[in-house]
Structures are given as structure tokens and as C-alpha cells.
Amino acid sequence: MAKVSETYSKWRSLGEGALAIILGLLLICFGQLVPRLGYQLLMGYFSLSAVWHLLTRWFQEKSRRENIFVTLAKLFLAVILFDSVILQDIALYLLVIIIGSYQLFTGLISLITWFLYRKNHIHPRINYLFDALWMMGFGLYSISPFHDATNFELLLLGFYLIMLGASSLRDGFFFEKGRSNPKLKRRMRMTLPIFVTALIPISTLRRWNERLSSHQVEENEVHSERKNEKSADLEIFIHTSESSFFLAMGHVDICYQGQVISYGSYDPHSERLFGTIGDGVLFKANREKYIELCKRESQKTLFAYGLSLSEQQKKAIEERLREIEGLLIPWEPSSQLLKRREGEVKHTYSYQLKHEADATLYKFTSSKFKTYFVLSTNCVLLADSIVGEAGTDILSPQGFIVPGTYQDYLDLEFKKPGGIVVSRSIY
């Protein structure tokens, strides 16, 4: 089964890469013709689907048959709308609005990051201001009602798809090759948009729940998979939970030598902008006690990915940990009780970490991590600044990584025969 999964993953990467590149080239060469043809193919699919239901309805069970008038209505609408120029124009306009809005969103992230870096005297930072200006400029140009920006945005989308496809092709071509990275050099990886990758942790959790629902398992049982006999020298935890939207997006910790290292906005008294910005807090906690606290406090599920490291990689990671250590000052969480939305009064999460997971907490005296921002200077960035010393290929061109992006990369590395991830466990 493992070999079948590896083969499937390899050809899936190659297929998705080739498809993205072909679609990107078509958008660059033919512009609006491509989405218009896509619209017609979609309507054609609905028409053929309705015809198929009509032809096969007599062979279906009565309870599963669709009402014949509903099927005929679908067929009629699909045929009528097949060549509707007005609907094609509306679909194109909505596509441009979505792309333009996303450009404004990512530009705003860069602008906020630049302001925070400027406040904390972090260099270099000019790249974030440059990204903010050109991304927000493109976004405003695209959503402006005074001109048609369709061809311009489709051109940009085409180039983006080509770069995304190139990353997938690279994954496919080098899928079976062993990891040889003596200089621990990192490579850029074009990633899916944030609003797509943000859903990966909760989607993975639901898939696992469906997979395990047919088996009789204990609630606290640990489900583990191993790729080979190599030992895991470092673990990356991806958290997720269905209890809230922000928890569903996930959280990332690392665990090295039995100690969990995590970063986040754990000082609620410093939070602002709806909790998205706050003082950056790093803590170190006992692994087992921390896992139990996560499961008990937030009903989280933790996906633990074990990485096998060379001696050179271990030394690079330990050197990075010493650098971070030099930026920290101890911080004592407040014992003040907080009232939750449900009316429950409890200690802060940071206080619970200290007293229930043997955690020691710190704030940063300087560096980009002095101020936490959920969409850029977040838990993933700190974890990647440490694990990245091992040469992981997860760098994105803009530097924004969400937990879903990381989990997608770790799952791919686990499937690769020579990938750095050698185990995967679920708590």
C-alpha cells in the first residue's frame, strides 16, 4: 500500500503541475476565451449529467431517483444558459473582483507587517512596503469600475499558475530521489492562496475522523505511521479543532529533545486589532503534559510529524535555538481570571501552560518576533525559522506561511521515499 501511495502522490504532483502550467499558458495566450470556454464546458457538463439521469433513471432504485421535472428543469436551464454572454461577463467580473480583493488583502498584510517592523526597528523591511504598494495598487486597479481589468488580471493569474505548476512538477520529478542538501540551502516554493491552505488542518482532521469512524478505537489512543526505521529527531505539531474558526485554521509547535517550543500571542492584555496583534510570547513546555493540556483545554487534535535529521542539521537547528535564546527575557503570566464568552471564568491560557504543562514563558527584547501578527509574524514563521535551518523547502516568495501550508508540505515529505519526514502520529 505504501508503494501505491508513493506512486499516486508522484503522478498527482506531475499531473497537477502540468495542468497548472498548461492552464497558465492558455490564460496568457488567449485571455478571456479560456474562462468563457470553461463556463460553456461547465454548462455542457450539467446538460450531459441531466441527460444521463434521464436515460438511467429506470435502472435506479425508486428511493434514489431524482424527480423527473427537476431533471428536465436542470437540462432546460443548462441548454438556455450555455451561450449566455451576460452570465459569462458576470462570471468574469466576479473572478476579477475575487483576484483584486485577494491582492488588497495580501497587500494589507504586508503593510501591517511593515508598520510593526518599523515600530520595532527591524531591518530589512523595505520589501514589505514595496509588496504592499504594488499589491494594493493592482487590487485597486482591478476593482475600479472605470475600466476593464480582466485581461490584466488573467495575465497575472496565468503567470501565477505557471509558477505554481513548476513547484508541483519539481515535487514530482524529484519525488523518489533521496534528500541531498549538504549546504542546507532552501528553495522557493509557490504556494496556494492563504484562504485555501487555511482550511487544510480542519479538512485533514475530518478526513481522519471519517477514516477512523469505521474502526473501534479508544478516545485517547495514539494513531501512528512510520515510513522507515529512522528515528525522529524533531517533531512538528499541527493543531486543529472544530470548536472555533481560529482553532480550525491550526497552530504550529516544534518539539526538540522532549521539549515543546511554541510562539504566539499568549498575553491577552497586550492584544489589539481584534486579537490579531499582540506581544510575541515564546514558551517551552513538557511534551506529554502539553499534549494533554491541548486536548483537554481546547478539544484539539494534534498531528505530530517526526523529522529525521543529520548531525549537520541538528547543529544548525541548535545554533538557531541559541540565537533565539539570546533574544528572550522571562515573563510571568498574570493570575487574573478572565471571563469567557460562555460565561465561564478561568485563568488565562498562558497561566495554565505554566502550572499545568511545566512551561516557562518569555517575551522578546528585539527581532521580528517581538510583536506577534497572526498573518505574518506568527507561530509558523518562528517554527520555520528553526526547522528551516535543516533546509526545508517551504519558503514562499512573500514570506507568509499559515499552518495549512506547512501541513501540506509535511504530508508530501512523508509520502516521499527519501523525504525528511519519517513518522506521522495523531493525538
Image (tube, rainbow, N blue to C red):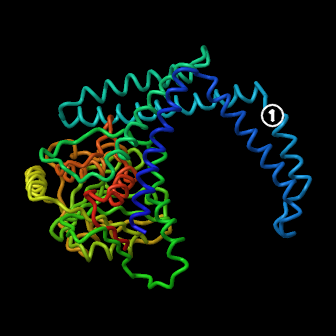
The secondary element bearing badge 1 is classed as helix
User: Can residue 328 be seen in this snapshot?
Assistant: no
Point out the image quarter for the C terminus: bottom left
In the image, residue 401 lies at what x, y percent?
34, 45
Question: What residue do we see at 27% from left, 69% from top?
Answer: 228
- What residue sits 53% from the left and 32% below the top? 23
Question: Quick check: can you spot residue 320?
Answer: yes
Q: Is residue 195 above or below residue 38?
A: below
Name the image quarter holding residue 395: top left
Residue that lies at the very extreme toward the right in this rendered image: 69
Q: Name the residue tied to disc 1.
A: 81
Residue 236 on image: x %, y %: 28, 61
Q: Nearer the viewer, residue 385 or 157?
A: 157
**Which residue is at 51% across, 81% downward?**
215
Q: Amino acid at mark 1?
A: Leu
Task: Tell me: residue 138, above or below residue 241.
Answer: above
Is 208 located above or below residue 160 in the figure? Answer: below
